[in-house]
Amino acid sequence: MTVQVLIPDIGEANDVEVIEILVSQGETVEADASLVVLESDKASMEIPSPTRGTVARVHVSVGDNVDEGDLLLELDPEPETEAGNEPQPASESEPVPEPAPESEKENENENEQESEPALEIAAEPPSKIRAESSDSGVTAISLKDKGIPQVHAGPAVRKQAREYGVQLLSVKGTGHQGRILKEDIQNYVADRLNNSSDQTLPTIPEVDFSRFGEIELKALPKIRQVSARNLHRSWLNIPHVTQFDEADITDLEEFRKQQSSELAEEGVKLTPLAFLIKASVVALQKFPQFNASIQPDFKHLILKKYFNIGIAVETEEGLVVPVLKEADKKGVIQLAKDSADLASQARNRKLPFDAMQGATFTISSLGGIGGTAFTPIINAPEVAILGVSKARVSPVFNGESFVPRTILPLALSYDHRAIDGAEAVRMLRFLADVLSDMRRVIL
Ligand code: CAO
């Protein structure tokens, strides 16, 4: 005997909308399984099946408005199994048997309808009436009152969104009045997978700042736009860790100042930078994993046998990183000349394209400006960058008394996928030791 399932008494809610149909013709449903989802102004509710059976015919469509007593669907009752239910698939991923072809089912149903009169049963009043809720559990009524954007989606869609970890607010609904459908969630997930670069990034909302006061739009130079993209890419892709240390450069500074006055006559400006490049190369030779790139599949480190040092240069147009090539083959005076030339070319926008490529390690020296410490961003695909802050004279205890020493703060940011923390500490300590006593360069 076919059972006609009618809309039950759903309280004050009359003329409610069918927002989702959870079963299809030919499908076997268990007693109490949800058949359709109705939604009124204030709540959505799932209508449960009064009995176990096969759906013979669905009489409503999404978007229909229904009242108590309306025919929802027809069901061919089936006896309960011993356990009360059909055996369930072992896991959700196991395939559920396909329902019989529609035509067969329709014929079966027609035959049954001919032979037996239909029994009318009002479905149980919905046990699952619930206030439309956002993911945060705030009711739609209060959301409306507060002017917070509402999400229109049925419980099954919400469940699917939760399973996929999808924020419903991010999904564009294509259903009636913008309602989010299951396909919308599926399309959203597929889109995200195809554009995996922004897969999990919440966006910073655009704000109309003029609401709060006067503003001015300043165009960003091309160089700044490019470096912004590169820095952002590095920041997002590389798990950065920054190791800090200090080098006692008292002796080095004394030597540098002596040499500076002599070299000034030749037009060479000797700053700590040239020594930093020299000492870095020696440290990179001892710790080759810092003069490297990591393969995208993480199976190999690409160790580079050449030593090209990128120098971060501040220009009016933005940050530029020219590359001082073959730094290992040059003495400190040549390094001073080359770095000054590159900085000047960068500031005059005269850098040849070749001078911007092939760096194996970068130094960002802000010491001429000031600062005690900072965390430089790695110049990908390199795996490390040295940040240098301003040297200061500090009292240092030598075991007997405090003596004034010139202390240079160092920061080494490294890609934690390629380098372990212990290696970074050793590398930076070694570098600091070289700077403290540059004679180590010739060892
Ligand atoms: N501590 C104390 N004094 C320092 C110093 C340090 N760590 N580094 C440089 N100085 C001194 C120099 O000796 C020089 O002093 P004198 O004029 O008395 O000789 C003065 O500071 C200025 O040096 P400089 O900046 O002209 O030259 P430099 O070789 O040290 O640096 C360059 C060259 C190109 C690195 C620098 O000009 C520059 O652009 N720095 C900014 C880099 C930057 O923006 N990095 C941030 C990138 S974001 O991570």
Image (cartoon, rainbow, N blue to C red):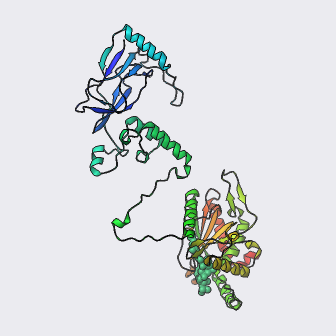
Which residue is farthest left? Answer: 12
Q: Residue at x 46, y 37 (%)?
A: 183
In the image, residue 187 sits, relative to residue 387, either above or below, namely above
In the image, residue 200 sits, relative to residue 229, either above or below, namely above
- Measured as percent of width and height from the top left, residue 83 is found at 43, 18
- Measured as percent of width and height from the top left, residue 106 is found at 44, 16
Task: Name the side, left or right, on which 46 lies relative to 406.
Answer: left
Q: Quadrant of ligand 1?
A: bottom right
Q: Residue at x 62, y 69 (%)?
A: 386
The answer to which quarter of the image holds residue 62 is top left
Task: Name the side, left or right, on which 91 lies relative to 256.
Answer: left
Q: Does residue 2 appear in this view?
A: yes
- Measured as percent of width and height from the top left, residue 431 is found at 67, 71
Q: Residue at x 45, y 40 (%)?
A: 184
Which residue is farthest top? Answer: 115
Q: Does residue 443 appear in this view?
A: no
- Measured as percent of width and height from the top left, residue 200 is found at 50, 50
